[in-house]
Image (cartoon, helix red, strand yellow):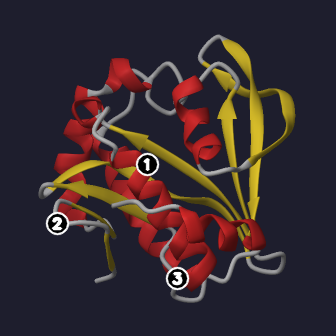
Amino acid sequence: MLQLYIDEKLSLRLFTEEDTQELFLLTMQSRKHLEKWLGWIHAAYSIEDTHAFIRDTWEQIEKNGGHPLNFGIIYDGRIAGTIGFHTFNRMNRSASVGYWLGEPFVGKGIMTKSFYKLLEYGFESLHLHRIEVRAAEGNLKSRAIPERFGFKQEGVIREAEWLYDHYVNHVVYGLLKHEWEELKKTYSIN
């Protein structure tokens, strides 16, 4: 099973069906923390939804030429969140990243290191030319991640997402392969 090691406590790995319960419990434990910006966490969210997400991650591997696109963030042997490519355009060699951390894992540098590892995987293993992040305009913590890595803010998509009872704008960030090459010369996750 593919596992991307980051340091002695942190890695990205594929989900298995055995992860369903743990991922669901983390999601429920972090519901208040996550629901402000993630529209899929609602009152009817169930363990079956978590199982379907995990099953879908494996189906995506087949559709994308054997390349996994979504990973569990594993911290100290526990699932801390998820990170992966929501969209993957093979022809244009581009992808869009999505991520979240459970509340107990926030503030430990986990997402910064995980994001860097996903960029490395995307540009080096998937041979992407462009990686994009779209974050709700008001979600400053999520927006800080691409900004930390030198992503260029490319624009705002007005009323791009429906969150429960209102629309939110999305800020679009992009990083190109040659920008990644420059970033890796100066940035270290350890």
Left or right of residue 69: residue 132: right
Please, is residue 24 above or below residue 11 in the view?
Answer: above
Spatial CA distance of label 2 from label 1 is 16 Å
Q: Quadrant of residue 65?
A: bottom right
Give amino acid for label 1: Thr
Task: Choose mark 3 or mark 1, whichever is in front.
Answer: 1
Badge 3 crowding class, 10 Å Cα cut-off, few under 14, some 14 to 19, many 20 or more, is: some
Left or right of residue 89: residue 1: left
Residue name at image x 75 percent, y 45 percent: 173
Secondary structure, mark 2, is loop
Residue 112 got which mark? 1
Spatial CA distance of label 3 from label 1 is 22 Å
Sequence-wise, the earlier of marks 3 and 2 is 2
Q: Position of residue 39 (x, y in %)?
A: 55, 28
Residue at the spot of label 3: 67
Give amino acid for label 2: Glu
Residue 8 got which mark? 2
Secondary structure, mark 3, is loop
Residue name at image x 29 percent, y 27 percent: 30
Q: Residue furthest top?
A: 165
